[in-house]
Amino acid sequence: MYNPLTSQKKRFGTLILTAFLALSLLAGPLLGFLPPAPVCGATHTVNVENVGETSATQGESDVSVRFKITNGQNTPFSFDGASLTFDPSEGITVTGSTGSVTLADLNDSTVISFDLKLARFAETGYRSYNLILTQGGAEVLNYTRGGFQIYESLAVPSGGTGKYVASVDISHQLTPSDGFVLGSGNTITFEVFNKGNTVIKDAVMSLTLPEGLSIYNDSNSINMGYISTASRKKVSFPIYVSDKAESKNYPIEVKLSGLDYSNNEVSTTKSFFIPVSGTGGGSLQKVAIESINAPAQVEANKDFTLSFNVKNSGTAAVSDLLISVEPDEGLLNKSQAVFSEKSIGAGQSKNYTVTLFAKAGDSRNIPIKMKVESQGGSGQNVIQYTGVYVGGDGSGVKTPQLMVSNYNFGGEFVEAGSGFGLYLTLFNTSPKKLSNIKVKLDSGDGTFTPLGSSNSFYVDEIPAKSTYTKKIDLSVKPMAEQKTTPINVSMSYEDGSSNGYTAEEVIAIPVMQENRLMVEDILPPYELYIGQQTSAEVKFFNMGKSVISNLKIDVSGDFDTFESNSYYVGNMEAGRSDSYSFSFAPRQAGPVSGTVTFSFEDAAGAPQTIEIPFEFTAMEMPIFEEPGFEEPEKTTPVKPILIGVGILAAITAAVLFRRHRKKKLHARMQLADEAFSDQLDQNRETEE
């Protein structure tokens, strides 16, 4: 008998089984449930099967990863060495070795084992691994596979059976989205995603704030209650920024604690760097020392003045500054040497003047260092050099002077690892010709090295009051520190009477490291249906040697969003990694395309943009139709009636035939009785 409800359940069960099998095929390689894989070695074919652990937890030791090696052909397969590596390898220590092994026949097998030890803060996620077998130092098998997963360790069960992991992702959003501002009205919202396989009960989130930030009229901890597996919860904290806060990134530490399903304590912490626009300080990245004014040459035992400007070309004020002048040996500061500046507003500059005294001694160029630094102990500073030539002993007789009057290196800075041309202009300030001139360049720490020549050059002569320009090709070492690097220019020369002289100058060239923001492929969602909100994630890394400033990430495309997908990273230190997750809902079936945009400032403050396009495929939502319960049509059952009539006619005929036959037999029996009676009568008459 047909049952619509039973049929529907069967169809739904078939659909679920099909989906489960499809997901198993997709998820199998990721989760480590891998079938034996044939691998071609140098001359052999073998089957490799992972029969050990396919996952581990941060801080776990003695994790046994085992491989079953099976000979896949009729010739012997041998190896005497085995190694196992992971990509990335950071945080995983592999131990284990093997002796000489020979698999002589087809399907002969052996198991080799490695022990893993994971660092407490090993990076979580999936890692690929590479198994290499060697014979006599030569590679005979190279097996690479993905799917070894490292879980975040919040707690380790104390007793019980089975293996479970409490693991969460914590993301944040800011209001205002570009960073906190002075006063109240700032909010930071955290979203917790329970990606482990245990519930987190009595979850509590708490904040630890640095000086200058505080919770506004609220508690620094919030009870989040019960966070079930694969669920998300949000909490928000109101933040107050004091008037002493500086314009920089502030670290905020978030702690999530609670109990797992066995009532063991679990907790994790994560730090976020939040941009703050304050008035109590500021970044010196946009501060420069310029408009330096000092005499090119001074006599010994004489005073002279040095003046310069400190300019803030940034968009926020800088405050609590120390400005100092530090002359080298041979010069004395006769006035104020250190200036304390409360604040320099955005776009403003201030002038400083000092009086210096030139001591008697050898005629030479003496460098002077000017420095701007923050009093807040942030380690930021700006340094610039100049120099004056001190000649003679103060008797009034001027020494012939050769000086660097100008230099140009083709821009505002040079990049580490690149080459550039330095144009150096020498000026003969004396009224006599100078000859037999030798010039030597030295950067001290080897930041700059000459290309195709030595670090010195020779000039036959420079006429009186004339200049000479020389191009020197230099290269910058790739690992050079990002800073303004001085170059000492040493000069020796003679006057018309063959008297020898020396002079020294200091020039400065800013060195910048190339910004290298590396972005991985965008991970697509497993399933994508029209109108259904889902999310995707992408990882990015600062692979350069310098800080990436004001990094912000946005996404756009032909889809709908129900919340802000902007993520302000702020300043990203060299070597740091992060991830960006965005939510969206497809509008129609088929290709869904978009672009993730990374915008930031390079070391020189110039805006940069990197766009990462992506394309996913959306599907129609499956529709399950309810089976109908239609009433049968009320029609006259002609055929059954005819059959019934036929059966009734047959029964009637049988009854009539039986009655007729019975009546006929009765008549015959009656005739026979009458005949027998007549015969008896005749016999009696005869006897009588």
Image (spheres, rainbow, N blue to C red):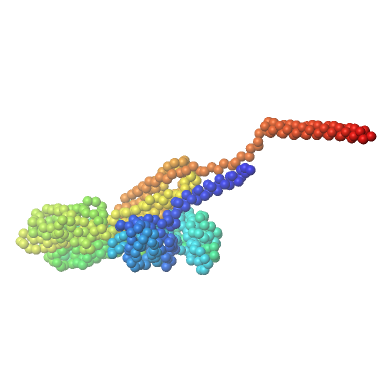
Quarter the C terminus occupies: top right
Residue 372, x across and y down, in percent: 30, 60
Residue 350 can be seen, yes or no: no
Q: Residue furthest right?
A: 688
The part of the image, by quadrant, that contains residue 547 is bottom left
Residue 522, x across and y down, in percent: 40, 50
The part of the image, by quadrant, that contains residue 363 is bottom left
At 11% from the left and 60% from the top, the residue drawn is 438
Q: Residue furthest left?
A: 497
172 left or right, relative to 679: left
Q: Quick one: 134 or 405, which is closer to the camera?
A: 134
105 left or right, relative to 661: left
The part of the image, by quadrant, that contains residue 641 is top right
At 50% from the left and 66% from the top, the residue drawn is 157
Q: Quick one: 322 or 77, which is closer to the camera?
A: 77
At 52% from the left and 55% from the top, the residue drawn is 231
Residue 287, x across and y down, in percent: 31, 56
Residue 471 can be seen, yes or no: yes
